[in-house]
Amino acid sequence: MTDASDSRALAPRRHDEILKRLAADGSVSIAALSAFFNVSRETIRRDLKQLADRGQLGLVHGGATLFEPTEPALTQRAQENSLAKAAIGRAAAGLVRDGMVVLIDSGTTTLAVAQALSGLKNLTVCTPSLTIALLLCRQPSTRVHMLGGEIDSGEEAAVGIDALEAIGRFRVDIAFVGGGGLSPDGEVTDFTRNGAEQRSRMIAAAERAYFVLDSSKFGRLTPLRIPRFELAAGLITDAAPPAAIGEAMVRKGPKLIVAT
């Protein structure tokens, strides 16, 4: 690593390079910048804070980004990576057995899970999603419980304290949970505090919980950690993430399942 005086002298050059990388890639990670510049992670954190204080980037867990701090609406995301999401849905549905209580998060990848559940019998499904509830209530021998709460019009799902409290009322065999991104240090993160907490409680309520994320979310930096994310049994995705990200996630606990 460079010494402190060299680091201060080279800071303007680092700042220029960081901004160029942001413009090209949309996000940067502390770990990658530390390795590239051969300086400590604390030095990079100071660089990013200085740039954030000038309004040139947004700080997020694990790095910085030129990002919108909210997720696009459900209708906007519905057609993105549809084949990948369908593959994830089939792999997730393969873990479900007749008679299970299944908790399904809102989102487009979890909707693909719900679509793949046809043919299973005597399921009880709990979900905050209006779309998923409407789909599955029409399936024979499937009971659907809507998690109560205020409806988020963009997500078309229940949110808030009522939804959080409802999650704890169910005995859940398996849960399928969404997320905003898989960070460079191998953690599933989210856009909002409420979303992160709701997903954390889903993990805690289930005997086994799986994140379902398509590969477009690898390396994406969103603002908030999902508490107790490491208690999830695994992450189901459509392609292997970069080795460093995948290895970091597996070290924390969840196993990687790549749909075929």
Image (spheres, rainbow, N blue to C red):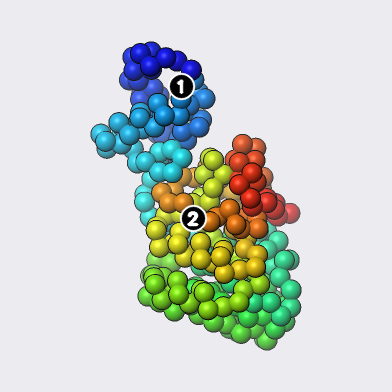
Q: Residue 55: which quarter of the image?
A: top left
Residue at the (74%, 78%) spot, across then down? 98
Residue at the (64%, 52%) spot, across then down? 254
Badge 1 density bin: few <14, some 14–19, many ≥20, Cα 10 Å = some
In the rendered structure, the answer to whether residue 14 lies left or right of residue 100 reads: left
Q: CA distance from mark 2 to mark 1?
A: 29 Å
Quarter of the C terminus within the rendering: bottom right
Query: Can residue 105 be spotted in the picture?
Result: yes
Q: Residue 116: which quarter of the image?
A: bottom right
Residue at the (33%, 34%) spot, across then down? 49
Q: Which residue is mark 2?
A: 226
Amino acid carrying mark 1 in the image: Val
Q: Give how far across and how far down residue 256 sits, in percent.
A: 68, 50
212 above or below 168?
above
Residue at the (61%, 58%) spot, across then down? 232
Q: Secondary structure at mark 2?
A: loop
Query: Can residue 19 be spotted in the picture?
Result: no
174 above or below 179?
below
User: Which circle marks residue 39 in the picture?
Assistant: 1
Q: Give how far across and how far down residue 37 sits, in percent.
A: 47, 21
Q: Give how far across and how far down residue 113 sits, in percent.
A: 63, 67
Q: Give how far across and how far down residue 251 sits, in percent.
A: 64, 44
Most extreme residue toward the left is 54
In this view, the residue in front, 72 or 234, is 234
Amino acid carrying mark 2 in the image: Ile
Q: Secondary structure at mark 1?
A: loop
In the rendered structure, the answer to whether residue 260 lies left or right of residue 149 reads: right
Query: Closer to the N terminus: mark 2 or mark 1?
Result: 1
